[in-house]
Image (tube, rainbow, N blue to C red):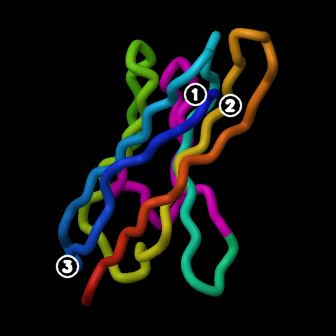
Amino acid sequence: QVQLVESGGGLVHAGGSLRLSCTASGSIASINAMGWYRQAPGKQRESVAIISRIGSTNYVDSVKGRFTIARVNATRTVSLQMNSLKPEDTAVYYCNADIISNDWVPLNLWGQGTQVTVSS
């Protein structure tokens, strides 16, 4: 069974930092793009940061200069370092990955979600 497991998140004051991590496990041949999305109450899920297999990154404008996405292909891990957090960053954060299984089946998987709450 191929899955994504997230860790990190929590409660922090405005201006603080948090780090999210996500690891893919199971029968995996390769992982293409990995990314982080978030969904605030009453809002649609939005893309926060995406990183390609070779390390090209893309960020939503609201987090540029504050968040950094990184990945380690050898450990199948993607992380999101979040600095200078603002109350508007409060949301459930989800890891996402485009995976090719060992059976050569393409999969788009989501992590279980982790709550990030930034108090003012």
67 within the magenta span: yes
Mark 3 → mark 1, Cα distance in angstroms = 31 Å
Q: Residue 26: x percent and y percent?
A: 56, 22
Residue at which label 1 appears: 52
Label 3: how many residues lie within 10 Å, few (<14), some (14-19) or many (20+)?
Answer: some
Q: Is residue 64 magenta?
A: yes
39 vs 2: above or below: below
Quadrant of the image for the N terminus? Answer: top right
Q: Is residue 59 in view?
A: no
Q: Quadrant of the C terminus?
A: bottom left
Amino acid type for the residue under numbered disc 3: His
Identify the mark at residue 8; answer none if there is no mark: none
Q: Earlier in the sequence, mark 2 or mark 1?
A: 1
Q: In the rendered structure, which segment of residues is drawn in magenta? A: 45-68
Q: Position of residue 92 (x, y in %)?
A: 49, 68
Q: Amino acid at mark 2?
A: Asp
Q: Earlier in the sequence, mark 3 or mark 1?
A: 3
Helix, strand, or loop for circle 2? strand
For mark 3, what is the residue?
Answer: 13
Q: Is 103 on the left or on the right of 47, as rendered?
A: right
Residue 89 in view, yes or no:
yes
Compare residues 31 and 6 and report the one nearer the observer.
6
Reply above or below: 13 against 24: below
Alpha carbon separation for disc pair 3 and 2: 33 Å
**Residue at the spot 53% in from the left edge and 29% down from the top edge:** 56
Residue 22, horizontal then vertical, whole percent: 43, 40
The residue to which callout 2 is attached is 98
Q: Is residue 19 above or below residue 79?
A: below
Q: Residue at x 71, y 19 (%)?
A: 100
